[in-house]
Amino acid sequence: MDQASLSDEEICQRRVVELLDRAIALLDAGDARAAAEIFRCVIKIDDRNIEAHHGLARALRDAGQHEAAIAAALALTVLTPADPLAHTGLSIALQQAGHIPQAEAAAARARILEWKQQLAESPVNDPGGEQNGLC
């Protein structure tokens, strides 16, 4: 399929994927600041792009921009409040910035969310709300 037959949305989505690939490669190569700029660019294009938000928080942490990393991680937890990984990332950012009590709280929240996911996926739970003979 050539560019002429693609919709504007498809072209934009392809560009986002290319930018994310480039940012991840930069992050992997150790250029966290450049990666952060590209993740920010993707967020300007699509402010609900989860991968870009995760990447930005990670890139800012790797760049040593602790307070900016916390802000990015908080934005991600607002966007995906039930995502344990988002809260884990927030915990790491808080820890690196020296905010230990807040980091521990974010880590605890991540564990609770993970447990909830595991329970929801567990074959022990049935749709009728019964616990299959468990107390």
Image (cartoon, rainbow, N blue to C red):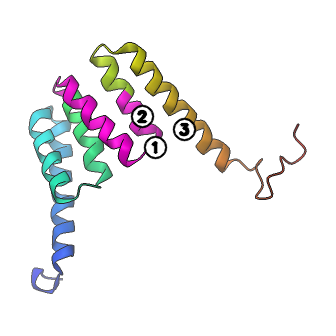
Q: Which residue is drawn at 70% across and 47% down?
A: 122
Judge whether 121 appears above or below 99 on screen: below
Disc 1 and disc 2: Cα gap in Å? 7 Å
Q: Quadrant of the C terminus?
A: top right
Residue under the point 51% across and 26% down: 108
Quarter of the image that includes the N terminus = bottom left
At 38% from the left edge and 26% from the top edge, which residue is drawn? 91
Amino acid on which the number 2 mark rests in the picture: His
Q: Residue 87 carries which label?
A: 2
Three-letter amino acid code at the position of disc 1: Asp
Report the magenta residues as a range: 62-90
Contact, CB < 8 Å: mark 1 with mark 3?
yes
User: Which numbered disc covers residue 4?
Assistant: none
Query: Is residue 13 visible from the viewing direction of this image?
Result: yes
- Secondary element at tag 3: helix
Question: Tag 3: residue type?
Answer: Leu
In the rendered image, residue 51 lying in the magenta stretch gets the answer: no
Question: In the shown orientation, is residue 18 left or right of residue 72?
Answer: left
What is the quadrant of residue 6 in the picture?
bottom left
Gap between marks 3 and 2 measured at Cα: 9 Å
Image x and y of residue 84, in percent: 47, 38
Q: Quick one: SS at disc 1?
A: loop
What number is the disc on residue 83? Answer: 1
- Residue 64 among magenta residues: yes
How far is mark 1 from mark 3, CA to CA? 7 Å
Marks 1,2: beta carbons within 8 A: yes
Label 3, on which residue?
113
Dot 2: within a 10 Å radius of its alpha carbon, few (fewer than 14), some, or many (20 or more) residues?
many
Above or below, comparing residue 129 to residue 9 in the picture: above
